[in-house]
Amino acid sequence: MKKRSRKISKIVALAKSEEQRAGAATGKSRRHLEEQRGRLGELNAYRYSYADRSKSLANVSSAHWKDYQNFLQRLDQAIVSQQQVVKDSEKNLELHRQRWLAKRQRLESLQKVLDRYQDEEAQFEERRQQRAQDELPSPDRPYTQDSDL
């Protein structure tokens, strides 16, 4: 009877390791997203700081002003690119999270089956022991072969 629970316990162990790997991948994806958001924040802060300097540039040559504007455009392009990286990282995180949830649900289902099998096996063993005890002679009625005579 214990064969069923032994077999399913191996499957549960495999499902558990799959769920843990999926959880680790989700965590890695979440850390990557936070890094990308941090970079975007740095770029935005740098852009704001650099744009704020333009107020102090009163009398500069047109060549310098053009270089300044080109730099701001490149910075804006970098921000747009980083925003796309953040969006892609968010999608990647959601994909990993969905995979992890599926693995977790599978593990929970398998664990319930294992628990049910173990409960059934325990009940079976309890009934077997009870039958064995019932077959033993009781102390107030001694066992004799001639008791039917």
Image: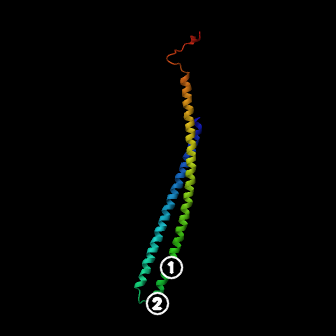
Residue 11 % position (x, y): 58, 45
Gap in angstroms between the C-alphas marked 2 and 1: 18 Å
User: Where does label 2 land, which residue?
Assistant: 62
Residue 132 % position (x, y): 55, 25
Q: Residues within 10 Å of mark 1 (few under 14, many from 20)?
A: few
Tell me the element at label 1: helix
At a point 52% along the width and 74% down the height, the residue shown is 80
User: Where does label 1 land, which residue?
Assistant: 74
Where is the C terminus found, in terms of image quarters? top right
The extreme front residue here reads: 140
Q: From what the image shows, is residue 89 above or below residue 57?
A: above
At a point 53% along the width and 50% down the height, the residue shown is 17
Residue 96 % position (x, y): 55, 59
At a point 55% along the width and 37% down the height, the residue shown is 119
At a point 53% along the width and 73% down the height, the residue shown is 81
In the picture, residue 98 is in which quadrant? bottom right
